[in-house]
Amino acid sequence: RKRSQSLGEHWTKGIPIEVIPMAYVPVSRALSRSFGGSAELRMAVSKAGPVVTDNGNFILDWKFDKVHDWREVNTAIKMIPGVVETGLFLGMAQAVYFGNEDGSVSVRQRQPC
């Protein structure tokens, strides 16, 4: 279900971006202004208020509206004051394994740059 040709094809909840609490509003605005789409503060389900990470930070879910050069975007987002980390884990895996409904496994190898 998660196999796709481009980012956001099936996953529509947005890219998670960890931010320090006092910066979530300016970071949200900077994301929308620079890259389009919208960034929303992730709210907790079982408690009142936003989701808080182990480090005491907030999570923004950035829902982008177009395909970007993700390496450039990842670097630019990390340069926004208040951003701790993004959910764009680029260049980390050599292969991805997909479990299929019939019990088989398919593999997608990393393409050379």
Image: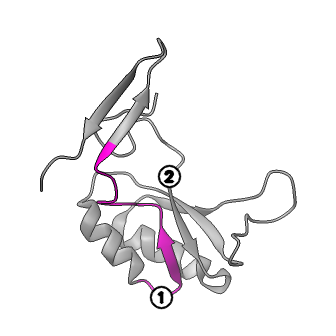
Q: Residue at x 56, y 71 (%)?
A: 18
State the residue at coordinates (59%, 84%). Answer: 23
Overall secondary structure of the magenta stretch? loop
Total number of numbered discs in the rendering: 2
Q: Residues within 10 Å of mark 1 (few under 14, many from 20)?
A: some
Residue span colored magenta:
80-95
| Residue 81 magenta-highlighted | yes
Percent x, y for residue 48? 87, 61
Quickly name the residue at label 1: 81
* Amino acid type, residue under disc 2 in the picture: Gly
Q: Quadrant of the C terminus?
A: bottom left
Residue 93: x percent and y percent?
Answer: 33, 53
Residue holding disc 2: 14
Q: In terms of image quadrants, where is residue 35? A: bottom left
Report the residue that reaches farthest toward the left: 113
Instruction: Please tell me whether mark 1 sits on a helix, a strand or a loop.
Output: loop
For marks 2 and 1, the one nearer the N-term is: 2
In-front residue for pair 64/46: 46
Dot 2 and dot 1 residues touching (CB under 8 Å): no
